[in-house]
Amino acid sequence: MSTSTPRAGARTRVGVWLGRPLASFHLIVTIAALLTLLGLVMVLSSSAAEAYAADGSAYSLFTQQLIGVALGVVAFYLALRMSVRLLRKISFPLFCLSIVLLMMVLIPGIGSEGADGARRWFNVAGVSFQPSELAKVALVLWGAHILASRRSEHASLKSLLIPLVPAALLMAALIVLQPNLSTAIAVGIILVSLLWFAGLNARLFAIIVGGGLAAATVLAFTAGYRSNRIKAWLNPGDDPQGLGYQSNQAKFSLADGGPFGVGLGQSRAKWSYLPNAHNDFIFAIIGEELGFIGCIAVLGLFALFVYTGLRIAMRSVDPFLRLLAAGSTTWIFAQAMINIGYVVGLLPVTGLQLPLVSYGGSSTAITLLMFGIIANAARHEPEAIAALHAGHDSRLDRVLRLPMPASFSPMRAAAARSQSSRPALDGRGRRPLESRAVEGRRPARADAGVRAGRDRRAPVGGRNPEPGRRTPRQPGVQRGHTDGRGYRR
């Protein structure tokens, strides 16, 4: 009993802390900070040797990563300050912009061509930007917006799938043309997660997932480097110095780490033994330098992130925030698990980065932006809104000077959805009666245009002294004028 009492007390304290109104918000901010700091440390450690050999400075790649983190912190803060209405308003223009950028990056002379012939980046003043990263954000925002709107309107299945599915397929096709199959897979994961959390029929959901897997399998064998990755994964020992070299070196790094690692900065694989040690295979360097304990810590942070993100989705009463939090959490977690899976040999190499940890300025900035949006959704939990409006804000809220979140109102949401389909104004500059009734105002009577010719009057400046009685119509009084008693005809 003496051993169980401390454990029970610890569980009680954790439960009490998780029951606080802003617990989800603090968890998301803490996880983002820890993963970002870990990424900066590991990028510096894993890239120092390669950067020194290429540029004569051990900090060149780390400096670029630091710039990406700085931009991501700014994006995180801006996402925290955005209102839900603004997020929904910019979702479709952002999606259109991402489609245009994905088309432009394929044009020679505009998009930069990599060493392998891929066109995935824009280079402006020495700063590279990958539009496919922005495309993932645009899809999850617009997808959550359109599915939440259609679900609230009890739309048909066709309305749920169109135009979201064709638009997502167009985005994935443009990304495949770069070519970048791994990011196209991430786009497919976002689409599938949004449809799942929107409550799509299980049978139709299975058909969509099966079709996506079949398309990914076909595309995997259409390019030589993709089929080589599949062969290296299926037969890692056939060509240990060729196709299977990178995967084998990653496993050797993990094995060298042991339980506690060889020490931070002491990796041997980063000295040109493991290609892309600071990027796609940074998890192998974590295992080598920090050991099994470091790998479990990284997995624990992502597991805590999944718990927090789905907790926010379950507690949200706004359908848009519910879909947005769930879809974003699934996307980031799935990308992390794919990266770790091919590093340890469970999956073929795809090239997806470890979120917030791998080297990549645009990827880090976009991921921090998504963490900011999820943290914003955490501040819109009903308990969090009540606590903030009651003055029980935390020190972090006071330091960041964040605006008060607004509670979700179905009537305001219906009015916002009717903005795009609002009828034109009539000759007197007013909207038809039906559109004004939708916005939550007092519904007008259908026979309002006939009431001017009825006998019922209302005084201009006060109440009717005899409520419920009809005043007889006085002859000789023009319509629109008042008689001697102050009654309007």
Image: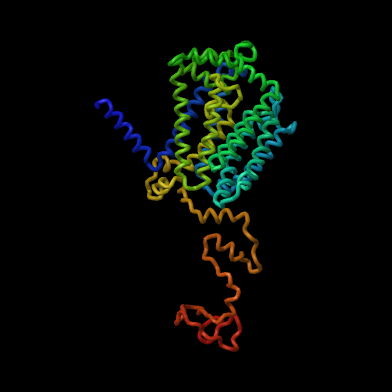
Classify residue 230 as left or right of residue 404: right
- Quarter of the picture containing the C terminus is bottom right
Query: Image point 33% across, 32% down: which residue?
Result: 11
**Which image quarter: residue 338?**
top right
In x, y percent, where is residue 71?
55, 34
Name the outermost residue toward the front.
Answer: 203
Name the outermost residue toward the bottom.
Answer: 475
What is the image's colouring?
rainbow
| Total labels drawn | 0
Classify residue 347 as left or right of residue 31: right
In x, y percent, where is residue 208?
62, 36
Q: Is residue 74 visible?
A: no
Name the outermost residue toward the right.
Answer: 108
Query: Image point 57% across, 19% down: which residue?
Result: 277
In x, y percent, where is residue 334?
54, 30
- Quarter of the picture containing the N terminus is top left
Q: Is residue 314 visible?
A: yes
> 353 and 122: which one is in front?
353
In x, y percent, where is residue 353?
57, 27
**Which image quarter: residue 301?**
top left
Query: Image point 66% across, 43% down: which residue?
Result: 96
> 80 and 259: which one is in front?
259
